[in-house]
Image (spheres, coloured by chain):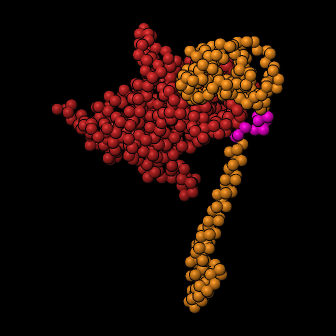
């Protein structure tokens, strides 16, 4: 971080600190950090995500004081202990369980924003990669957290996901045994998941610190995708973006509160109110909503190992994205063709999520019934085929559309600087 | 690190005592290489040995931290169960827990056995004859691990077009021998290790 601050230690203790551990100076640098003046509300999700992480850690530490890991006690300690007996337990768990969903809503918007405005392009590749690492850690944490209440969906979700790793030849089986600590998902599995679920958020916090550090070296991207050229393009982070982020968090809290107080179980699954039973599989296993697109990709491929590779590959695409985008223009604001393909990509992700929640052989358009066209293993009018089409687009978007479009597309004229279009627009108005 | 830095420093100090001594020691090391303290090959060897010892030591400490996650002795002790087959009627299936996993004990009808044997020559994903999946002379007893080889769900009997099991999770279909016939599962339903203690009792595991 280069010095952007006018900070002068004024008191004796600040001067003493400044030559030993300049922590007040660091705070001043963060607050005065020159930030592009044209950031829109899509840029407030970084602040919202920090808020989400803090909320999950605080509520999680409290819940761990009442939760008992163990096959015989976990379900009761949650459904009876925390939800009924512990003072405000229902509220704290409501915040924590729905907080996970809020966290993912925010992270998906944050990622789509980065993709649209090209925030992963040079010199911000490492910033993006650190974000991808945070996303992976979030998924692992959320998965293990969902196992802890030890309901039917917890148990069978854990079984299905850990079995995914068994698909890999040679190393697969030893790894699943190592994860389970037994012949199947059982008490040892639950205990180690609890331990790791407690650990990972702190790792996330550490990577978030690196993410913010990597942000503060090149500075923020902005909706024009044009780098900051002069001081005229920026405003200090405080008060401009502390206020904007604060307002956005306030709005976000309204949505959060609607779930906590009016629909606390809307994002969960009814089967998780049944204690785990290793001998009975629920009729229809679905993961939490934030994993559904990947689940749809997994089911779209008829072969087990290929399905698992496709699912992990879908996440790997994100890591490769900075080197797949060949365009010289960052922001899709000036890329009219890319914008269309990107919007289709967002819709495809939503379609994959929808497919992941359905039974694979059900008809997408029930009125149509069976088309009679049976391709490979299923009727064309089925969710498995919709998933396959969407999966094909998902991968094509990263591997074909993004690299080719970057070379072939003619972008619109890009402004010289952040301030330029604003001033040009005003000049045009006066004319 | 400290040792390798020491040599130029000691040479500098040695300058005070005259170049003669340096020449002497060079001649000495030429005639008696084992004696020289800063012989480069000997120093490299010490570095390699030290690094190898550190890596070996780290691995020795890491292994217990990894291996503790493998099944503990009490989990492994749950290895075998005995079961009285007379409780299972013809055409019935009983599910018992073995190693905390569901185990299907199916008393097959002659029709199911005939279908299973007829399937021996079908185009199988995981080729196995029905005879390989039951004990000789006990073809009516099919004992299977009730865990779909796709992702571990419990398949349901009596559904799917092969008269055997159907997995509700991802639609794998098994025949009356528990062999995979359709869907994403790669392998047949596993047959555990078991033995008939007498005509009525099996010991599984």
From the top left corner, tell me how far across and down residue A191 is, in percent.
Answer: 70, 34
State whether residue A207 is above or below residue B10. above
**Which residue is at the front of the view, A408 or B201?**
B201
From the top left corner, tell me how far across and down residue A137 is, in percent.
Answer: 56, 38
Q: What is the display colour for chain A?
A: red
Q: In the image, what residue occupies the spot 31% across and 38% down?
A: A404
Q: In the image, what residue occupies the spot 65% across and 65% down?
A: B49
Q: What is the display colour for chain B?
A: orange
Q: Is residue A323 magenta?
A: no
From the top left corner, tell me how far across and down residue A240 is, in percent.
Answer: 42, 37
Toward which corner of the image does residue A338 lie, by quadrant? Answer: top left
**Residue A354 visible from this viewpoint:** no
**Which residue is at the front of the view, B134 or A27?**
B134
B41 relative to A238 in the view: left or right: right
Which residue in the rendered view is the most extreme toward the right? B198
Quadrant into which the N terminus of chain B falls: bottom right
Quadrant into which the C terminus of chain B falls: top right
Q: In the image, what residue occupies the spot 48% across and 46% down?
A: A213
A406 relative to A311 in the view: left or right: left
Chain part drawn in magenta:
B69-77
């Amino acid at each position: 971080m280069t010095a952007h601050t006018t900070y002068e230690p004024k008191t004796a203790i600040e001067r003493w600190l400044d030559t030993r551990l300049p922590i007040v100076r660091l705070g001043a640098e963060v607050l005065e950090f020159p930030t592009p003046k044209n950031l829109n509300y899509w840029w407030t999700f970084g602040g919202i995500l920090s808020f989400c992480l803090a909320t999950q850690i605080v509520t999680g530490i409290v819940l761990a004081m009442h939760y008992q890991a163990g096959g015989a006690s976990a379900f009761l300690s949650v459904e009876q202990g925390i939800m009924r007996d512990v003072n405000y337990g229902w509220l704290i768990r409501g915040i924590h369980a729905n907080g996970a969903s809020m966290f993912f809503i925010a992270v998906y918007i944050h990622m789509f924003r980065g993709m649209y405005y090209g925030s992963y392009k040079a010199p911000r590749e490492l910033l993006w990669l650190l974000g991808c690492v945070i996303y992976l850690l979030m998924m692992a944490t959320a998965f293990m957290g969902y196992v802890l209440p030890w309901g039917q969906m917890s148990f069978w979700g854990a079984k299905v996901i850990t079995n995914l790793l068994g698909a890999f030849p040679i190393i697969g089986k030893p790894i699943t045994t190592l994860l389970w600590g037994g012949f199947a998902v059982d008490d040892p599995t639950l205990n180690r998941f609890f331990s790791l679920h407690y650990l990972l958020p702190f790792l996330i916090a550490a990577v978030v610190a690196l993410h913010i550090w990597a942000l503060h070296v090149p500075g923020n991207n902005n909706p024009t995708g044009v780098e900051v050229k002069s001081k005229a393009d920026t405003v200090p982070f405080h008060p401009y973006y502390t206020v904007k982020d604060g307002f956005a968090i306030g709005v976000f809290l309204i949505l959060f509160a609607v779930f906590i107080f009016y629909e606390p179980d809307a994002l969960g699954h009814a089967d998780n109110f049944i204690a785990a039973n290793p001998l009975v599989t629920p009729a229809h296993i679905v993961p939490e909503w934030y994993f559904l697109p990947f689940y749809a990709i997994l089911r779209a491929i008829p072969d087990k190992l290929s399905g698992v590779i496709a699912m992990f590959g879908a996440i790997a695409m994100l890591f490769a994205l900075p080197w797949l985008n060949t365009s010289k223009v960052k922001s899709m604001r000036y890329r009219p063709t890319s914008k269309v393909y990107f919007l289709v990509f967002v819709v495809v992700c939503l379609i994959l999520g929808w497919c992941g929640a359905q039974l694979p052989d059900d008809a997408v358009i029930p009125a149509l019934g069976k088309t009679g066209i049976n391709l490979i293993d299923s009727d064309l009018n089925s969710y498995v085929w919709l998933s396959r089409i969407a999966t094909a687009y998902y991968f094509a978007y990263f591997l074909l559309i993004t690299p080719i479009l970057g070379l072939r597309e003619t972008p619109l004229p890009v402004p010289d600087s952040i301030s330029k279009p604003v001033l040009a627009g005003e000049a045009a108005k006066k004319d | 690190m400290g040792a390798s830095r020491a040599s130029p420093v000691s040479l500098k100090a040695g300058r005070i005592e005259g170049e003669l001594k340096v020449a002497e020691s060079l001649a000495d090391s030429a005639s008696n290489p084992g004696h020289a303290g800063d012989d480069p090959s000997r120093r490299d060897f010490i570095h390699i040995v030290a690094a190898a010892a550190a890596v070996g030591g780290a691995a020795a400490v890491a292994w217990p931290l990894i291996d503790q996650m493998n099944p503990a002795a009490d989990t492994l002790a749950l290895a075998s169960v005995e079961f009285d087959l007379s409780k299972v009627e013809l055409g019935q299936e009983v599910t018992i827990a073995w190693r905390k996993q569901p185990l299907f004990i199916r008393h097959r009808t002659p029709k199911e056995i005939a279908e299973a044997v007829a399937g021996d020559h079908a185009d199988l994903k995981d080729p196995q004859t029905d005879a390989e999946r039951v004990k000789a002379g006990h073809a009516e007893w099919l004992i299977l691990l009730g865990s779909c080889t796709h992702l571990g769900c419990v398949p349901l009997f009596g559904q799917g077009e092969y008269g055997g099991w159907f997995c509700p999770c991802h639609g794998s279909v098994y025949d009356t021998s528990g062999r995979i016939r359709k869907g994403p599962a790669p392998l047949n339903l596993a047959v555990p290790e078991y033995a008939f203690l007498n005509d009525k009792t099996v010991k599984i595991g």
